[in-house]
Every structure is written in structure tokens, then in C-alpha cells.
Image: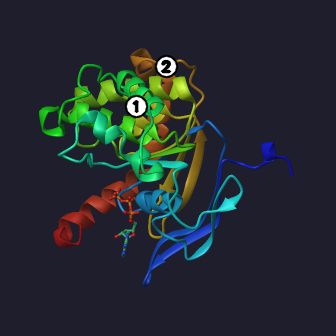
Amino acid sequence: MSSRNVPKLEFSDLSMEFGNLTALSHVSARVEDGEFISIVGPSGCGKTTLLRIVAGLERATEGSARLNGKQITGTGFERGYVFQADNLLPWRTVLGNVLIGIEIRDGSRSRDEIAKALELIRMVGLEGFEGYYPRQLSGGMRQRANIARALAINPEILLMDEPFSALDAQTREVMQLELNRIWQHGKKTVLFVTHQIDEAVFLSDRIIVLARRPGRIREVLDIDLPRPRDLTTKRRPESVDYVDRIWRLIEREVLDSIEEEKANPDKH
Ligand SMILES: Nc1ncnc2c1ncn2[C@@H]1O[C@H](COP(=O)(O)OP(=O)(O)OP(=O)(O)O)[C@@H](O)[C@H]1O
């Protein structure tokens, strides 16, 4: 088979059990090179679990996740991970944090790699802050540094787990625009988990909508909005229609999960 036929990422009949809890059940999907894919669904439907399987942090109990046709069995530098909370090292500067993946991978960093890291810092809008420490930065700036750090190892695929959820609404909107611009620039494959449906619609080529109990694919939607996208994209009637459509798919389950959280606050 030619490499053109091998998807960047493929889930085949993947299931994940934690004891007697089925977190994911028979998930099959393919992600092509350079696609921006979001995963949305109610709380507890297995979004993070799916991302952790791709990261190699969890192993599916059944079925497989393949990267470039090869079964994922552990972590690897071809995958960059951006978590919900930034996990920058407080004793390292922005530049030091961005270089950390390279140092772990290679044991050192070359002058070229420092130049590339500085270029990434500029690209995420942190030029002039290279020597700042995390505590000297705002939440939005820290998350920009986090994205630069994930990109510094030049991963083939970027895994993003609610990266903007800790940000205020305006910073979040700016970061969505930035991520859209960065993606447009590098065309990396991105797997993006979010609770915010309009964010998923704005950024994605396709959206995987998961259902819960057990976590499974409810629907996969192509987001047929023109690119490049900007803030006006969000106000387009087609965008609003996509958001409504996805919301209707998950509304009942979201309301149920909120009720359950109210009834069992300790479990969440
Ligand atoms: N390590 C684990 N051990 C036991 N159960 C787990 C583990 N990780 C996840 N789960 C359970 O698997 C289910 C799916 O969890 P997951 O975090 O993937 O959902 P999610 O869709 O990302 O949720 P949220 O939107 O609230 O972040 C949940 O019921 C969760 O409690």
C-alpha cells in the first residue's frame, strides 16, 4: 500500500475499560495528514482518554490506535501534547521552557535549534518575552509559550486537551485566532479536545462528536467553512447552524451529566 493511503492516525474498533467502566467503546475513525480535528462531547464521554491513547499514555484494552500505520505503544517525539493547565517549569525562562523537549530528546540544543525556538516564540506572539519567567506572564502568554514548546520538537501531530479552558473569554478568542493562524502556517495534524462547540467549529476541518456511557462516536461532521477564517467566520449563519446541530446532538447528555455532577459532587 502506498503511504498516501495510510492515514496519519487511525482508530480501529478501539475500546477502553477502566475496571468495569467502559470509557470508550468501538471507536473507529481516521485522521488525514494536516487535518484539524476536534473532539467534543459531554463530560465523561472519553475525550481525554482518546487523546491519552494517542499520546501513548494509555493503552486501549481492545482495538488499536495507529500513527502512520504503526500501532501506538508508547510516547514519542512525533507527538506534541498541550494540556489544559500550562505545565511550564517555573525556574526556566520562556526560551528555556520552549527548548526543554529538544534537550530531553537530544541531550543538548544546537544553535540552529535555539534560532528555531526564537522563531516559534515570535510566531506565537511572545517576541521580547524570551527571558521572562512563567510567573511574569499572563495566563494567555503562558499558554502561548506552552504551544511554542509543543511545536519546538516539530511534532507531526499536536494533541491539545482543552488548552484554552483556563483563559478568560477574550483571551480565549484571541488564542483561537492565533492557533488558527499557526495551524494555517504549518498545517500540522491537530487533535483538539474542547467543551466549547463554537471553538471547535471555528477551528476544525472535522468534528468527532462523542456520546457517553459508554463513550462512542455519535457523529462525525465535516466543517465546510472557507479558509482562511477570522472572527467574521464565527458570525456566519453556516457557523451558527453547525453549533446548533452539534449542540442538539449532545444536549440531553450534557444536561444529564450536569444533574449527575450535582447529585455526586465528590465523584467529579
Ligand atoms: N485512570 C482512570 N481510572 C478510572 N477511570 C477513569 C480513568 N480515566 C478516566 N476514567 C473514567 O473514564 C471516563 C472518561 O473519562 P475522560 O476523562 O476521558 O472523559 P472526558 O470526556 O475527557 O471528560 P471531561 O469532559 O469531564 O474532561 C470517565 O467516566 C472517567 O471517570
Q: Position of residue 258 (x, y in %)?
A: 26, 59
Measured in 3D between alpha carbons, the distance from the residue under mark 1 to the one under mark 2, in whole angstroms, is: 31 Å
Q: Secondary structure at mark 1?
A: helix
Q: Quadrant of ligand 1?
A: bottom left
Report which residue position mark 1 lands on: 114
Residue type at mark 1 is Ile
Report which residue position mark 2 lands on: 229
Quick one: label 1, few (<14), some, or many (20+) residues within 10 Å? some
Q: Residue lying at the far bottom in this picture: please name it.
A: 20
| Residue pictured at 22% horizontal, 29% vertical | 131
Residue type at mark 2 is Arg
> Looking at the image, can residue 138 be seen?
yes
Q: Position of residue 211 (x, y in %)?
A: 48, 59
Residue 133 relative to residue 208: left or right: left
Q: Secondary structure at mark 2?
A: loop
Residues under numbered marks 1 and 2 in contact, where contact means CB atoms less than 8 Å apart: no
Quadrant of the drawing holding the C terminus = bottom left
Mark number, residue 45: none
Closer mark to the observer between disc 1 and disc 2: 1
Q: Position of residue 231 (x, y in %)?
A: 39, 18
| Residue pictured at 49% horizontal, 56% vertical | 210
Along the line of sight, the residue nearer the viewer: 163 or 68: 68
| Residue pictured at 17% horizontal, 32% vertical | 138
> Looking at the image, can residue 193 be seen?
no
